[in-house]
Amino acid sequence: MPSILVIYNPIAGRGRVKKHWEEVRQGLIEAGIEFDLAKTSAPLDAVVIAEKAAAKYNTVVAVGGDGTVHEVVNGLLRASKEHETIALGVIPLGNGDDFAKMIPPQTAIGGKVFNWQEAINKISKAQTKLFDVGRMSDTRLDFESDNLPHYFMNGMDIGFGAQAALNFTKVPKFLSGMMAYLAAIMKTLIDYHIPEVTIQIDDEAPFKQSTTMTAITNGRCFGSGFWVCPQAEIDDGMLDVMVADGIGRMRIMGLIPKIIKGTHLNESVLSNYQARRIVIDSEKPMVVEADGEIPYPQIQHLEIQILNKKLRVIV
C-alpha cells in the first residue's frame, strides 16, 4: 500500500488544477512516487479526507491553492489533536499560493513561487521541516464536541481583507492571480465598513481599536502579492500582527502599492506586533478570513494562538 495520499481539487486556481492535472499525475509517476488519489467534489471535502488519511498514510499531498491546503491542514491538525502532524506536501496550482511562498527557499517579494515540477522534486526527496500553525476558536477548546477550532497555516484577518475575500468569489472567472485579487479589492472599496473592536496582545492590557483591517499572520504574503507582514517567520513560535487604523478609501489606495512592495511597516496608520496569543472582541458580528476561506462568517469573540512547530511540511 502506498504511504502517500494525493488530494487534488479540480476547481482550484480557477481551472489551473484541471488544466495541469494529467501532467502532474504523470510527473508523480515518472518520479517513482507511489500514491493513492482522492479528488474533492465539495467544500470541506479535503478536511474529512485528510483527517481520515492520517491513520493510513505518512504523507498527504495537497494539489491546489491556499484553500485546498487550508482544508488539508485542518484535517491533519484535527487528526493529531494538535500534536505533530504527518507530512504535508504542497503542489501549488492556486490563485495566490501564499503558503507555498514560505516553503524553502522562500519566495522573495515580487518573486514567483516554485512550480509544480519543483514541487514533485521536493516530494520525491521527502525532506521535511516543522512549521508553526495558527489556531482560532470562539470558545474554550473541546475536541469531544462539534465546535472544533479552526487552523490557518498562512494568515487570517478581519475587516477589509475579510470582505475582499468574500468579494473574490464574485470576481469574473477569466481573471486570475493578482488581477483577480485587485478586482476584489476594487469591489470592496465601493462598500466596506470599519469594525470597532477590542484587541488584547498576549498579557498586555486590551485596547479599543477602530480598524480598517487587522491581520494576524504566520506567513508573509496575502492575496497573491500583498506582503502584509514581510518579516514574518514560519517557525519562530510567534504570530505577526498588523493593525490598520480606521482610514478612508484614498489612504487605502495609497497603502496598496507599498504593501505590494512590503515597504509599509513604518506608516503612521499601521501598528505592528508579535504575539503568541491574540483576543479580538466586537459588539457587532465580524467576518473572519483565513487562508482565503471564511471559517467564521459572523462572530463577536475570537481567540488566536500559535501552535509552535506542529505542522510537518515537505521542503
Image (tube, rainbow, N blue to C red):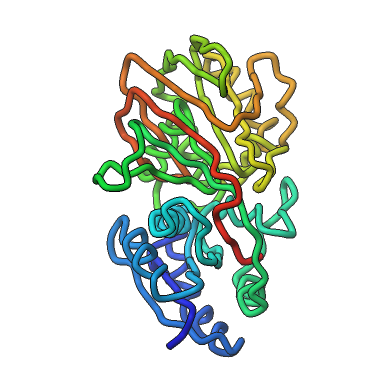
Q: Quadrant of residue 302?
A: top left
Q: Residue at x 60, y 18 (%)?
A: 251
Location of residue 293 (image quadrant):
top left
Toward the viewer: 246 or 167?
246
For the point 54% across and 44% down, which residue is it? Answer: 307
Quarter placement of the N terminus:
bottom left
Q: In this image, 95 relative to 105: left or right?
A: left
The picture places residue 182, in percent across and down from the top left corner, at 53, 39
- The C terminus, quarter of image: bottom right
Q: Nearer the viewer, residue 47 or 252?
A: 47
Q: Is residue 22 visible?
A: yes
Residue 107 in the image, given as x and y percentages of width and height: 71, 53
Residue sitting at 54 percent across and 88 percent down?
29
Nearest to the observer: residue 236 or residue 233 = 236
Residue 14 appears anywhere in the view: no
Residue 235 in the image: state x and y as whole percent.
66, 48
Labels in figure, total: 0
Could you tell me residue 207's position as x and y percent? 52, 10
Where 255 sits versus 175, above or below? above
In this view, 148 is above or below 202 = below
The residue positioned farthest toward the left in the image shown:
146
- Relative height, residue 239 to residue 25 (above, below): above
Relative side of 187 to 142, left or right: right
